[in-house]
Amino acid sequence: MKTIIRTDRAPAPVGPYSQAVDAGGFVFCSGQIAIDPRTNVVHNGPIEEQAKIVMENIKAVLNEAGLSFGNIVKTTIYLINMNDFAAVNEVYAKYFTEQPPARSTVAVSGLPKGVHVEIEVLAKR
């Protein structure tokens, strides 16, 4: 059994996928990019601002599932430019002040809508 998680407080999917899927005690969250869910406008500004929007979008999906950042057990960060690693890390760290999850960071050649960062998370109930 699986349950689809959907909220208007995070951007609608830009393809045929769900914002998150709850299955087997885990919530699998699709990657979030810097789209303002209120306006559906893509933010291509400074990487710090993009990262904050991404983290707030993740927060909205988790909240809809009845979870928080404390439930996250694994994250994957996708970056267009590894030179942005420190700046994204600084924003990311503000959301994980205690017991941060396991994490991977991967350099990629492109991301949807021309953004520079995408983050996906896996949370445990």
Image (cartoon, helix red, strand yellow):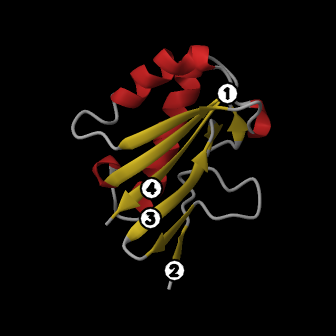
Disc 1 and disc 2 in contact, CB within 8 angstroms: no
Question: Which residue: 70% across, 25% down?
Answer: 44
Camera-side residue of 37 and 72? 72
What type is the residue that disc 4 sits on? Answer: Leu
Q: Amino acid at mark 1?
A: His
Q: Quadrant of residue 109?
A: top right
Q: Amino acid at mark 2?
A: Lys
Image spot of residue 43 (x, y percent) = 67, 29
* Residue 51 location (% of width, % of height): 53, 29
User: Which mark is first along the chain, 1 or 4?
Assistant: 1
Distance in Å between CA atoms under marks 1 and 2: 31 Å
Residue identified by numbered label 3:
27
The residue labelled by disc 1 is 116
- CA–CA distance in space, label 1 to label 3: 25 Å
Q: Earlier in the sequence, mark 3 or mark 4?
A: 3
The residue at which mark 2 appears reads as 2
